[in-house]
Amino acid sequence: MQVSPSLLAANFTNLQREIDMINTSEADMLHLDVMDGVFVPNISFGFPVLNAVGRISTKPLDVHLMIVEPQKFVSQVRDCGASIMNVHQEACIHLDRTIHEIKEAGMKAAVTLNPSTPVGTLEDVIAELDMVLLMSVNPGFGGQKFIENTLTKVCRLKELISSSGSKARIEVDGGVNLSTGRMLAGAGADILVAGSFVFGSPTPHEAIRSLKAL
Ligand code: DX5
Ligand code: ZN
């Protein structure tokens, strides 16, 4: 299993120490949640923080944009050093165009689905995608309860990916801990995002290692 700890649950008064913890851990990526107070009912952080984190992180940046009109920010996300740019299907009118712009900018393209958005909506773009991010909570806040229906969605997405010959990997975000992570591993998830489970742990390296072992 791959693991992408979400910085949203970190101690923002000491980001250097939190990033050092991630850099020296077995994490595969670092997940960064950008919120605009419009697409989701909360505001997190923006480019000044992404740029600062990009300068000190040795892990690939997995940027999750919970904002309207994410296509306006492709080059700014690339310039902060992002490896993967996640845009919400619900926020993109011309999703196919946005996917191509992300790839042309040199990043991996990922599309995120809210819990209420069916997997089938990706049928016509799945072949183009490097990753699909399934939300297992309604986006906007850390520390929420895992929505069980996500397990069915992972299975459906897995079928769509194999029937279309896509190489997309499946990432899941929200309410991930050892027990939900184990169920997600069984359903076929490739990457787990974990905020509170990692940063809320007294032994975060061990928390990351335990998810990776699933
Ligand atoms: C929620 C964010 C998540 C969040 C996950 O809108 O997209 O990445 O940080 O937090 P936990 O793991 O605490 O549910
Ligand atoms: Zn996220």
Image (spheres, rainbow, N blue to C red):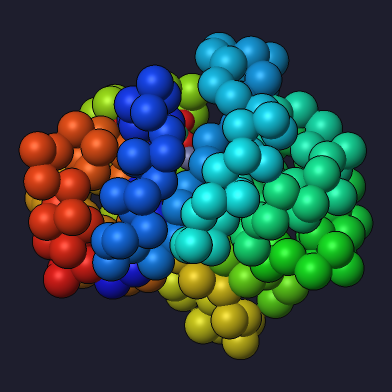
In the image, what residue occupies the spot 85% across and 63% down?
A: 105
> Splitting the image into 4 quarters, where does residue 175 fall?
top left
| Residue 141 visible | yes
**Residue 100 as seen in the image, left or right of residue 51:** right
Picture coordinates of residue 60 (x, y %)?
A: 54, 63
Q: Quadrant of residue 51?
A: top right
Percent coordinates x, y for residue 174 in the rendering: 35, 39
Q: How many numbered circles does the render carry?
A: 0
Q: Name the residue: 61% across, 39% down.
A: 52
Left or right of 201? Residue 112 is right
User: Looking at the rendering, which quadrant does residue 16 occupy?
Assistant: top left
- What is the x, y in percent for residue 68? 76, 27
Can you see residue 116? no
The quarter in which the N terminus is drawn is bottom left
* Front-most of residues 4 and 189: 4
Image quarter where the C terminus lies is: bottom left
Q: In this view, does 204 lie to the left or right of 63?
A: left
Q: Pick whichever, 3 or 183, lies toward us.
A: 3
Q: Which residue is drawn at 50% across and 54% down?
A: 57
Q: In which quarter of the image is ligand 1?
A: top left
* Percent x, y of residue 173: 40, 45
The answer to whether 12 is drawn above or below residue 26 in the figure is above
